[in-house]
Amino acid sequence: MMTDKEYTVLKDADVRMIDPASVPDIRNISVNAALPPVERIRDVARQMNGNPFVYRCGGILVKMKFSGTRPLQAVLEDCLEHCT
């Protein structure tokens, strides 16, 4: 389980300080629907080098900000589904 401090560090990462080559392309991330929800999130976070807030889509570095009550899993699945 992640602490509040660890979550804040990931959420507040400065995208200007991130090497795009160190960030996975979301088009290469897959969600294993056979896993239980908690394990799906862990697996996606692992594929995203541990930070689900930052990814690349092609040559564009993206930083996500979550608001509302949608589960992280649903948000990530939407991103994966609509990224071309």
Image (tube, helix red, strand yellow):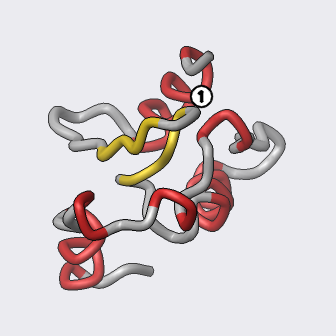
Q: Is residue 10 above or below residue 75?
A: below
Is residue 52 positioned above or below 25 on the image?
below
29 relative to 10 in the view: left or right? right
Instruction: Residue at 22% x, 43% y: name it.
Output: 65
Task: Identify the residue shown where x is 78% and y is 43%.
Answer: 32
Mark 1 crowdedness (10 Å alpha carbons): few <14, some 14-19, many ≥20: some
Q: Position of residue 4 (x, y in %)?
A: 20, 79
The residue lying toward the viewer, choosing from 39 and 60, is: 60
- The quadrant of the picture occupied by the C terminus is top right
Residue 47 vertical placement versus 74 (above, below): below
Q: Position of residue 2 (x, y in %)?
A: 38, 80
Q: Where's residue 36, x and y in %?
A: 70, 51
Left or right: residue 59 versus residue 70 is right
> Residue 32 vs residue 4: left or right?
right
Q: Is residue 60 left or right of residue 45?
A: left
In which image quadrant can residue 5 be found?
A: bottom left
Q: Which residue is mark 1?
A: 80
Q: State the residue at coordinates (23%, 60%).
A: 16
Q: Secondary structure at mark 1?
A: helix
Measuring from the top left, give residue 1's x and y in whole percent: 44, 80
Viewer-proximal residue among 30 and 38:
30
Q: How many marks?
A: 1
Give the amino acid at mark 1: Leu
